[in-house]
Image (cartoon, rainbow, N blue to C red):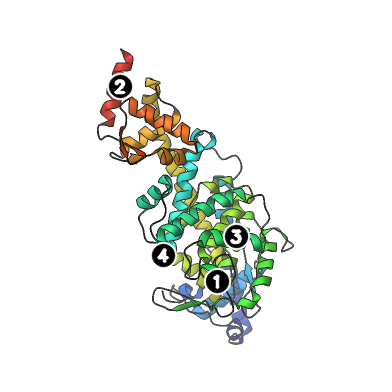
Amino acid sequence: MKIPQTPPPLNELMTRLQKPDRMIQLFSLMQAQKTRGEYLHWDKLRRHPVPDGFTHEEWWLATKLSRMDGLRPIGLKDKKGRPFFFSVPELVMEELHQIDLGSGGQVSLPDQITNPQTRDRYLVSSLMEEAITSSQLEGAVTTREVAKEMIRTGRKPRDNSERMILNNYVTMQRIRELKDRGLTPELVLEIHRLVTDGTMEDPTAAGRFRHQDEKRVVGDDYDQIVHIPPPAEELEERMKAMCAFANVETPDYFIHPAVRAILLHFWLAYDHPFYDGNGRTARALFYWAMIRRGYWLFEFISISKIIKKAPMKYSLSFLHTETDDNDLTYFLLAQTRVIRQAIAELHAYIQRKTEEFHDAESHMKALDLFNHRQVELLLHAIKHPNHRYTFASHGKSHGIVYQTARADLIDLSARGMLDSQKKGKQWIFISPSDLSERLMKLGKEAQT
């Protein structure tokens, strides 16, 4: 990945403006910049057609000056002690409004999500999706199908990639339990320990800060250095400052909860306090912050799925911030767009599943022979011939105890809806390729 070009220093640009009338013209350009619908970095702006009568350098100076009024500092500082700033331009405000509408308060959702009897299936699927894609962003190599089979059946991970995914799944479950607790350095270490358990070259590195001799230079796939984190000896104080920010103790002005969660994500990623697992820990803290502030729908949303589709944009948002005077607005805008897209995908998924569910549910209810869990399994089985189910996988998918899962599957097998066979001590239930025909036959028999 090519590192974006660092903008020319403002003081140098200012010294070139010697004529008073040129400054007046620049002020008019500044006003025009405030109404533009973009937040361009110098590396992009210098490639755009320049406004008539100006140079790219003058355009950039007008852009920077127009942004300065809105920038506000947070407690995060770079390696040279310079603060990071952020602003909330109209582009970000629009995204925040859509996030609030789509994921907070009394969001209108179908009964499958709001009903405690059925919401666990959606929750489990969402937690698995985030666990898988977040691990894949950090190098895990396995298919979604294999990873989901591992989680559903409860089998042990076969390799490091599967272990990363299982760790993420366990961590996401734990995040839901921690939403009422304030963030402390000890809690951050606990989350990191969960994320990295059994995956580190040095097992003792899980759940502790990197040491002074563990210099971590973050690079891309071509070994290009893109980020050098702060010295290890600063990490304890930096972590205290980060936790104070996460707990809304600093700064002394209001920050929108979603903005604070996004900045927390950046903060941990920038400090890079661990030898490995920083990205996964940063995204876990983002979820903790969102769920803690009442955005309950984030239990079902996967931001890593969206980031994975365009990882370059994710990386560039970090680099744009670092190369342009620590302006966090680049990362803020990129992540609000990711979040809004993740929300939109969840709503589309729910709508799609709702329609499928209602079609199948109408047929199943007409038979009046199955409970809601069995209906869900049969709907899945129709779309996945030869899929295998076990008492453990069915129980985990629906958040039910072993005895209930066993009763569900044995009943479906007895009615001829699933084929069954025993392997060793374990019963396996298989969806038949002619399940639709069997259901139709069962329906006719029930009507006679």
Task: Check disc 1 and give the amino acid type.
Answer: Thr
Tag 1 residue = 321
Cα–Cα span, label 4 and label 2: 48 Å
Q: Quadrant of residue 414?
A: top left
In the image, 261 versus 206, the foreground residue is 206
Q: Residue drawn 66% across and 60% down? A: 246
Under mark 2, the amino acid is: Leu
Instruction: Choose between 353 and 72: the one closer to the eye.
Output: 353
> First in sequence: mark 2 or mark 3?
3
Residue beneath disc 2: 442
Q: Decide: few, some or many residues near mark 3? Use Cα within 10 Å; few <14, some 14-19, many ≥20.
A: some
Judged from the image, the secondary structure of the residue bearing numbered disc 3 is helix
Q: Nearer the viewer, mark 1 or mark 3?
A: 3
Count of numbered badges drawn on the protein: 4
Name the residue tied to disc 3. Answer: 190
Of the residues under marks 2 and 1, which one precedes in the sequence?
A: 1
**Depth-wise, is mark 4 or mark 3 nearer the camera?**
3
